[in-house]
Amino acid sequence: MKNLGIGTGRRKTSVARVYLRDGNGKITINGKDINNYFVQNEYAYVVRQPLLVTSNDQKFDVLINLYGGGINGQAGACRQGLARALSQYDKENYPSLRANGFLTRDSRMVERKKYGRRGARRRFQFSKR
């Protein structure tokens, strides 16, 4: 089956490789249906947003390879990858995807732990005496 568009999405420590193919709206993530992979509907909705904005929700089958991170980061990575694939397929989709912020990489990451601290910023309890 021929890929119509390919996109890579990243969020926190998650990476999603998204492949657009001709079909009828089936989304497969790591070999599972989207509703089986993301049990909560809000994450499945986040992934579908680029398709809904460009009104392509019944036009393509989407195949996603996903690894790293947690469930929220994975959903965000899928959304960005799908938006990139849709804009690669048809340049007319670009303005609406950009306006909704689906093409922007959310660069917020977990801050690293520093030495001499309990966490990234948390200090040990100070004792005056």
Image: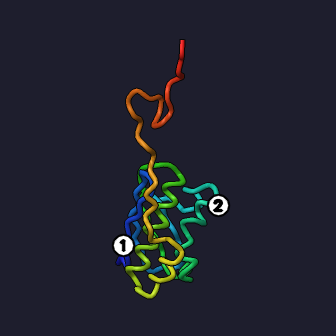
At which x and y percent is residue 10?
41, 60
Q: Amino acid at mark 1?
A: Ile
Q: Residue at x 47, y 77 (%)?
A: 98
In the image, residue 117 sits, relative to residue 6, either above or below, namely: above
> Closest to the observer: 42 or 27?
42
Q: Which residue is mark 2?
A: 41
> Closest to the observer: 81 or 109?
109
At which x and y percent is residue 3?
36, 76
Report the number of discs: 2
Q: Amino acid at mark 2?
A: Asn
Q: Residue at x 38, y 70 (%)?
A: 7
Q: Earlier in the sequence, mark 1 or mark 2?
A: 1
Element marked by disc 2: helix
Count residues near mark 1 (Cα–Cα under 10 Å), then give few for <14, some for 14-19, many for 20+. many
The quadrant the N terminus occupies is: bottom left
Instruction: Estimate the spatial distance between the alpha carbons at disc 1 and disc 2, rounded to whole Å.
Output: 25 Å
Q: Residue furthest front?
A: 128
Count residues near mark 2 (Cα–Cα under 10 Å), then give few for <14, some for 14-19, many for 20+. few
> In the image, is 110 to the left or to the right of 40?
left
Q: Residue at x 41, y 85 (%)?
A: 90
In the image, residue 51 sits, relative to residue 8, either above or below, namely: below
At which x and y percent is residue 23?
48, 79
The quadrant the C terminus occupies is: top right
Q: Which residue is mark 1?
A: 6
In the image, residue 72 sits, relative to residue 45, either above or below, namely: above
> Closest to the observer: 15 or 30?
15
Q: Quadrant of residue 91?
A: bottom left
At which x and y percent is residue 100?
54, 75
Q: Residue furthest right?
A: 41
